[in-house]
Amino acid sequence: MASERDFFDLSGPFHLTCVDWDNAHDRKSVAASLVQGVYVLEKDRQGRREGPNALALPWWAFFHFQLLRTLVDDVDSSIFGAIYEFKPPPSMCNDTLHRGPRYVVAFRGTITRADSVSRDIELDIHFVRNGLHQTSRSEIAIQAVRNMVASVGVSNIWLAGHSLGSAIALLAGKTMAKTGIFIESFLFNPPYVSAPIERIKDKKLKHGLRIVGSVVTAGLAIAMKAKQQKNLSLDSFAALSAWVPCLFVNPSDHICSEYVGYFEHRRKMEEIGAGSIEKLATQNSLTCLLMSAFGKESEPLHLIPSASLTVNFTPPRDFREAHGIHQWWKPDLRLESKLHKY
């Protein structure tokens, strides 16, 4: 049986009858709705809902998007992504249309249903182990983004994703950014692999733990790279700094809340004169360094130099709401946004 959350007219951003593409809330809401469209596409497939019984269409059609194609996992045949084309009617008069995308590539997160849960959880584990880039789903996603950039140009494309889907979008965005191609990206509840330090209420203890973590990480990075005779240059990480993805996190969601502390800690370290330590620590993770020590090279996907970080301080009813995609199109949210440049 379909959930109320799958019906656009019951839980979608139907209040956005006229989108202002210059407005951050409107842009965020449309991107989140397109991601929800991918979730419902896969639920339609699993529930064998077709024709008039399918529920996915309004999630993009309401905003004058058309579904170009779906992205299908080669292991379980689930729909994990979609490519949309913006096709506003000729009669639409909107001075901000030029700020909207022509195409959006969107990725869903984990669905806890029998037909997809095992593959999704497997990919979640790959992410925790910094191995998401080695999976076929990621390869399919990155190739789809490459093909879109080659055919329509980078300025016409948005990337969007939620949870595991935001990790895939982040991977695709970082891969393109390394070649100098910067895609506008909307990453909702992006997972961050770390101890849950952000949940500690004592600010002094929390800051102290982060300082210790930075010193240990930076020291280990220096030792490892000296042993491997690698250049300690930060060029590869700094090269990504021109790409500024939009991150949307909820402090009550332990899956993504560490991004709040990650960027705030960088600012505090610079204030106390320890910016050089943090510049090295911020591009490394202890997990990746330890894996490198055993000859397993990996890159911490969740670490990025720059971002526009939006935090939703609206109290959630439960974890499901704090981690859910639906929160991001609700009006009257208590949001705080900051630009963090490396």
Image (cartoon, rainbow, N blue to C red):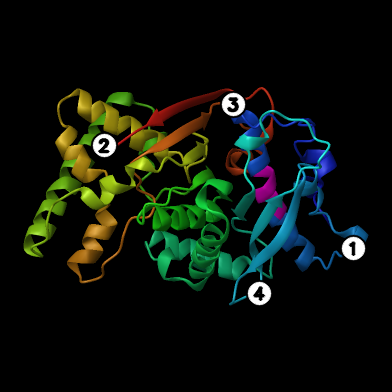
Up/down of 170 relative to 101, above or below: below
Segment colored magenta: 32-37
Q: Amino acid at mark 4?
A: Ser
Element carrying mark 4? loop
Q: Would you identify the image quadrant in which residue 15 lies? A: top right
Residue type at tag 3? Thr
Examine the structure image and report whether residue 199 is included in the region drawn in magenta: no
Residue found at x 54% / y 26%: 313
Chain-order first, disc 3 or disc 1: 1
The numbered disc on residue 51 is: 1
Nearer-N-terminus badge (3/2): 2
- Tell me residue 316's x, y (percent): 61, 32
Element type where label 1 sits in the image: helix
Give the label on residue 210, or none: 2
Residue type beneath disc 2: Arg
Q: In the depicted view, which residue is nearer to us: 188 or 96?
A: 96
Nearer to us in this view, 26 or 73? 26
Query: Which residue is under mark 3?
Result: 314
> On the image, numbered disc 4 is attached to which residue?
77
Please report contact status of discs 3 and 1: CB closer than 8 Å, yes or no: no
- The answer to whether residue 328 of the structure is visible from this angle is no
Query: Disc 2 vs disc 1: which is toward the camera?
Result: 1
